[in-house]
Amino acid sequence: MSPSDVPANIQSLVENAKDLFDKSFSTDPIEGFIHVSTAPGRVNLIGEHTDYTGGYVLPLAIGYGTVCYGRGSIVKRTNGDMKCRVVSMNNPQDVVEFEADPSSVPSVTNKWTNYVQGVVLQYLADLKGDEIFSFDMAIAGDVPLGSGLSSSASLEVATAVFLEALMRESGADALSMKGDRERKKDRAVRCQRAENVFCNVPCGIMVGKSLIRCLMSNCRLNLTIFLFLQDQFVSSAGCQGKLLLIDCRSLDVREVAMGMDNTGCKPVLVVTNSNVQHNLGDSEYPIRVKQCKEATERLALVNSSILSLRDAAMDDIAAASSKGLLDKVLLQRARHVVSENKRTEDTACALEKGDWSRVGQLMNESHTSMKDDYEVSCKEIDILVELAQGFEGVYGSRLTGGGFGGCTVTLVREDSSQRLIDYLKEQYKEKIGTDCTCFKTTPSEGARELHI
Ligand code: ADP
Ligand code: MG
């Protein structure tokens, strides 16, 4: 591993995972070659609550991720004692064993291993009927858990890359014939399926069964599938220095490079975790989806080409409103989604031009729209956004993710970023009484094998 290729935090995750591996699997080791993989978490810069109406989102892979360090191979199933053994730095005493068998059921006691086992089961179908995966694996990650930055997707995708390495070595690589983009998408689909099927956690956004039913009736099937795929897709296909503008209807993905302004400055993103997640989100989310569906039906009465909010323009909203077709709430919801889609496309253009002031302005407008029109913010998030927006060197700041807590994302000059972090921590403690956590990131590389 060349130190210049691998960020310092990922290098230290590799070292931690290696130490844990050596400690945990020194007795009776499973045979095979050592493989190391890594996959990042992700954050959405702009384009919130636009995905389920076929609109645009603009996420990036962050510089924090999960590392899988392991040794293994593909063996004949007849070796009944062959197992997969996994251990995580989060629980270093606890080595968990499971069988890579299609009849396996999710663990109730070691829920985190379901993310690994679920992915293993997705790849099992590519092996010959009498073959099975057998490996020892140690895991280390630095994506904050459960804050909407997709630590689960990064664990799944890093596991997938590890398994692909085992398969390639044994000549069982089913994905090898695919192009790079197809391969990354295929991997993301498998990981998303693993999470939904084996971990029973509909992912990407916090959803309940009612939302899924609603989506199924509202959207084309491929949209529904892709909607839940974003976390894993960005983790799999993220690019150094680039964001991914995803069209959730056509499923087209455009890589958006962060340009340079005329002073040669490239800002950084500060992600701030409020460390609160209000339960209200669970019930409010399906309500928002339903309201978007209703608003679409009303707007279609003034413009029959509107099949989802993605098709609507501000003029359509004004026309429907003047005819009394939209009540106050539906007007607000439609206004957020329609304006947010435009902001997201505009942000991609401004990023490419290095027009940071414009990007910041669009981010600020997005926050106001989420707060006032979509009503998914909360006190803690509004305080963080307000503090950041008023800080010198900040271009813009907004809530990221589904809302009712979670994280904010702030675009800031690199040379002001540390002062901003210190300020946010101090002020949040003073105003809310608890700690927020902050980290800096720029668009980072997606999942890959590390050759050490
Ligand atoms: P998010 O994906 O937003 O971080 P989730 O609830 O979807 O939140 O996933 C978090 C879960 O993923 C954790 O509770 C844990 O089960 C699993 N996980 C993620 N990273 C690791 C890791 N390094 N070690 C063990 N489990 C992990
Ligand atoms: Mg998750």
Image (cartoon, rainbow, N blue to C red):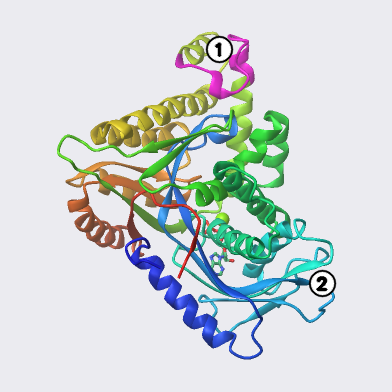
Magenta-highlighted residues = 297-314
The answer to whether any part of residue 19 appears in the image is yes
Instruction: Using the image, determine if residue 372 lies above or below residue 108.
Output: above
Determine which of the numbered discs, if any, sits on residue 229 in the image.
Answer: none
Answer with the quarter of the image where residue 325 lies. Answer: top right
Amino acid type at image mark 2: Arg
Location of the N terminus by quadrant is bottom left
Determine which of the numbered discs, if any, sits on residue 77 in the image.
Answer: 2
Q: Along the line of sight, which residue is nearer the eye, 56 or 449?
A: 449
Query: Is the residue marked by circle 1 packed among few (<14), some (14-19), or many (20+) residues within 10 Å?
Result: few
**Distance between mark 2 and mark 1 Cα atoms:** 66 Å
Instruction: Using the image, determine if residue 216 lies above or below residue 105.
Output: above
Disc 2 under 8 Å from ligand 1? The reply is no
Q: Along the line of sight, which residue is nearer the eye, 219 or 260?
A: 260
Secondary structure of the residue carrying numbered label 2: loop
Which residue corresponds to the image point at 60% horizontal and 30% vertical from the top-left?
291
Residue 124 in percent (x, y) is at: 75, 60
Which residue corresponds to the image point at 31% horizontal and 30% vertical from the top-left?
350
Which residue is identified by label 1?
324
